[in-house]
Structures are given as C-alpha cells and as structure tokens.
Image: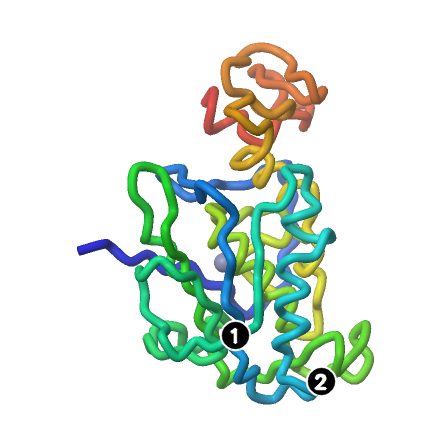
Amino acid sequence: MTKKTVIALGVLAVMAFATTASAYVLLSPRRTWSSPPTYIVDNRGLTGVNDGNGGETRTRNAIVSSAAWNGAGAGTVINAVVGSVSGFSLGDGTPMLNFRDPTGQCNGNCLAATFTGFFSGGTIFDADIVTNNSHSWTSMGEDPGGSGCNGEFYVEGVMVHEAGHGLGIGHTNVSGATMFPSVSSCNNGPASTASDDDAAINDLYGGGGGGIPANSCQGRCGQQAPAGCWCDFACQFFGDCCPNKFQQCG
Ligand SMILES: [Zn+2]
C-alpha cells in the first residue's frame, strides 16, 4: 500500500508579502523521475475555459514551455500530450492530468492537486494531477494577458505549478515563484518559473550524471558556491544564501 500524499495549489485569500530571503523546498524524501515523464492531458478539456478546446492545448503547451520547467537549465525534464484519461488510476505508472477529480480529494479552496506519494527508492513512478472544476477557470486563449478575466483562475499557471510537484518540488515561501502555495484569480504568473523554481529543478535534474549544481551547498558548507551564493553562517544576515543552504548545512 503506497501512502498517498496530496499537495494542492490553493486560492490566495490574503495577499502575502515575503520579507525573508528564502528558498525552494524539495519533496521529502528527495525523489526524481529516472527519465522525463509524459503527462496525458485530459482531452475532455476543462469546464468553463472557452478557448476552443477547454484549455487542453494551452495546458499542454504551458507544461512543456521553455518559460517553465524545460527552460530552467536542466534540459527537457517533462513532456505532455493531449489524450484520453479514461484509464485514470493513481499509481499505475502513467501520469495523467485530469480536468475532473475522480478522487474527490481536491475541494473548497483547492484548485488542483498532485498525488506525490508514488515513488520507490528515490524514483518517482507516477504523479497524477486532478482539478477542482467547481472553481471558475480561464486560459490565456480565452482572456489574453488578464484582459476579460473576472474572478477566474488561469489553468496554465496552476498546472505548471502542479507539474512542479509532479517533478519532485514542494512549496516555497518565495512570493511570485511558481511553487508558492497559493495564487490569486486572474494571475497567470506561475506559468513562468522564477529563479527560485529554476534552482529547484536544477537541484533535482541539473548537472547530469550526478554533478552538484553550481548553486548547491552540498559539500560546500562554510564556503561560497561557484554560483556566487554562500553556504556559511553569515549568509542569512546578508541575504545571499544558496537556495538549499539550510537543508544542507543547517
Ligand atoms: Zn502546490
């Protein structure tokens, strides 16, 4: 029996302003795909997205966009195709993005959720995504650049966030990052990853062959990392710590 862990993107009820320099958080225990997964994006489309095909093409393109995970510096880390999710089943080894929620586990303020509990020995083998379609949804095809959006959530940004969970990343407290745990309506910012998000993907998938990313404190505690950030005690006062300083060095 595999323990199921759900990590959801919620509705942002109160605007929060981050005041501390902080960093991405990887899912614990650390886990990665052994090769880039190919997500099946629900070809039924998402209810309420009026862009010609229910946002399915926009979602697929956002997930594989070079503005997101595949452009973060670690090469192609995720693929996606539009297809049938009729065989949707948690943990079956086929990652699917379902525009409904047959599990019934994403309710209320939950916009969408990723089931991150399917891994073995540090290797992810499934990470399905479900959607709460009781919210009002839109896409950049329906409401380009926020124009015309009224209380709706952009499917592209939300699904790039969920895909981040699927790749092994948790929530950050860096405001404006894709992996921030909540989003306000009419904000498609999460469709483009921020430097904090990119650092996470490079930590997990960068430096092919097990190399240590230039901004990692792994094996560099008390020193400056090649990327210029620091892994020493003082960095928290100067605000120039590497993203994983506290995980690696305390
Ligand atoms: Zn989330």
Residue displayed at 55% across by 47% down: 172
Q: Tell which residue pokes out farthest to the top in this image.
A: 223
Residue displayed at 31% across by 60% down: 91
| Residue 156 locus on image (x, y percent) | 65, 68
**Mark 2 CB within 8 Å of ligand 1:** no
Q: Secondary structure under badge 2?
A: loop
Callout 1: few (<14), some (14-19), or many (20+) C-alpha neighbours within 10 Å?
some
Task: Give 18 or 151, whichever is nearer the viewer.
Answer: 151
First in residue order: circle 1 vs circle 2? 2
Q: Which residue is mark 2?
A: 51
Q: Which residue is mark 1?
A: 83
With 137 as the anchor, is 171 left or right in this view?
A: left
Task: Give 31 or 153, whichever is nearer the viewer.
Answer: 31
Which residue type carries mark 1? Gly
| Residue 166 locus on image (x, y percent) | 47, 54
Residue displayed at 64% across by 57% down: 64
Q: Are marks 1 and 2 in contact (CB under 8 Å)?
A: no
With 250 as the anchor, is 199 left or right in this view?
A: right
| Residue 14 locus on image (x, y percent) | 60, 66
Compared with 78, 196 (above or below) is above
Q: Secondary structure under badge 1?
A: strand
